[in-house]
Image (cartoon, rainbow, N blue to C red):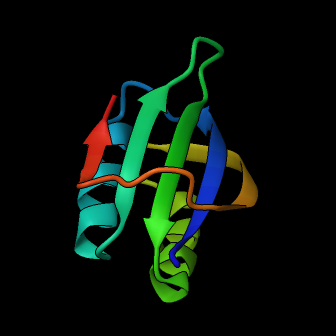
Amino acid sequence: MSQCIHCCVSGQVQGVFFRASTREEARRLGLTGWVRNLPDGRVEVFACGERAGLDALLEWLHEGPPHANVSGVEVDWREQDAEYADFEVR
């Protein structure tokens, strides 16, 4: 069974292609799930897959794309609660 991470990324993370870049990175790592902006300026990420891919995505989220300025990443490890066919921007 796949593991999942639920993350909230804070900092300058909206308007800098964070969601699209996260989707590209997650797909490259073979992960499924979704990413979306939150009204408070953070970006929320739910990703599922193999532990190595999730660890790599988590490391990437601490940096983000070139124009992002990540100040923090809250992460919660979870059991997979649904099947996702792909990784999508919501």
Q: Position of residue 78 (x, y in %)?
A: 69, 60
Where residue 55 sits, quadrant-wise, is: bottom right
76 on left or right of 48: right
Q: Quick check: can you spot residue 46?
A: yes
Instruction: Write the residue at 51% across / 88% down.
Output: 52
Where residue 15 sits, quadrant-wise, is: top left
Q: Position of residue 66 (x, y in %)?
A: 36, 53
Report the front residue among 22 and 63. Answer: 22
Instruction: Write the residue at 33% across / 52% down.
Output: 84
Number of numbered markers:
0
Report the front residue among 62 and 69. Answer: 62
Report the front residue among 35 and 41. Answer: 35
Q: Position of residue 32 (x, y in %)?
A: 35, 59
The vertical placement of 39 against 41, above or below, is above
58 on left or right of 21: right
Furthest residue toward bottom: 52
Instruction: Write the residue at 45% across / 80% down.
Output: 53
Quadrant placement of the C terminus:
top left
